[in-house]
Amino acid sequence: MTAENQGRGADALMAAITGDPLSDEARADAAFMAEHDSAAADLALLREQLGIIGHALAEPPPPAPEPAPVRRPARARRRIFTVALGSLAVAAAGSVLVGMGWLLTQAGSGVSSDAGASSADKAAPSQQSVGTEFGSPPYLACSRLVAEGRVTSVERVAGTASLRVTLDMTRYYKPDKGEPELTFTVDESLVPGLRKGDPVLIGMKKGAREPDFWAVGEGDIAPERAWIRASLPEARDLGC
């Protein structure tokens, strides 16, 4: 293509883009008009395609399919006191606030106070948090009752949201033996759907009058039972 044709094509394209009216001289130039008409057709097609793309982007995305409901065991549930959960939530919120404050104070210096600590030290959970977990040696050392039983009676306490649960005790871990039957009052929200015949595992700390831990159903009891058996030898040598 000659320099003249290249210059004519560029002018025709620019005229088509800007939409400026053409001069009589340009209209009389057949080659120029051919370039201009071709450029105008290409621009029209380009605008059409851009319109389709813009319309597609402007449309809201199709609604995501609703997730299938998760089936939860009806009778194998681990329950702990709501008070304990609330305490954990408060502690977590406090930790977040403290962490944010630390970040704000350290942002200017760019130096971390624990820069020399290893990643393993930072990731390791505190002994205090591990010790509070049911079934751990410290928990067992500070508990006065850890045992399994089977529900023989579930009665609602009149005027309350509590249940009076009677257990036929089948296995004692701490102490080694105890009463054949025990009765406790528990908030219904901790053992929803509890029925006569359900197997349960309970834990009660020293000085407490009611269990602070309930596991209902063999599915939840089995892993806790294994941890208790593994922790008992160490727990016997610990003080509370």
Image: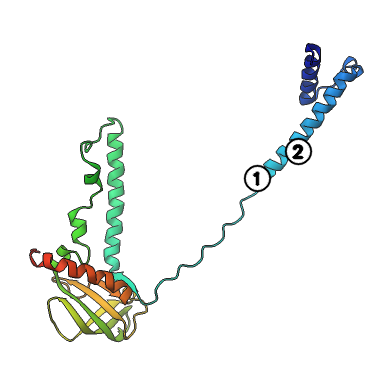
Mark found first going from the N terminus, 1 or 2: 2
Question: In the rendered view of the protein, which quadrant contains the N terminus?
Answer: top right
Look at discs 1 and 2 and give the one toward the viewer. Answer: 2
Q: Which residue is mark 2?
A: 48
Residue 190 vs residue 223, the one in the foreground: 223
Q: Quadrant of residue 21?
A: top right
**Left or right side of 75 for 32:** right
x%, y% of residue 9?
A: 79, 19
- Tag shown at residue 58: 1
Q: Secondary structure at mark 1?
A: helix
x%, y% of residue 68?
A: 51, 66
Q: Quadrant of residue 231?
A: bottom left
Q: Is residue 79 above or below residue 130?
A: below
x%, y% of residue 25?
A: 89, 14
**Left or right side of 175 for 51:** right
Instruction: Residue type at mark 1: give it.
Output: Ala
Instruction: Residue type at mark 2: give it.
Output: Glu
Residue at 31 percent across and 37 percent down: it is: 104
Residue at 19 percent across and 72 percent down: it is: 204
Q: Secondary structure at mark 2?
A: helix
**Left or right side of 214 for 230:** left
x%, y% of residue 73?
A: 39, 73
For label 1, the crowd category at 10 Å Cα-Cα, with few meaning under 14, some 14 to 19 and many 20 or more, is few
Q: Quadrant of residue 152?
A: bottom left
* Label pair 1/2, CB-CB below 8 angstroms: no
Residue 192 vs residue 10, the one in the foreground: 10
Outermost residue, front side:
1
Is residue 142 among the parts visible in the rendering?
Answer: no
**Alpha-carbon distance for marks 1 and 2?**
15 Å
Outermost residue, top side:
3
Residue at 20 percent across and 62 percent down: it is: 132
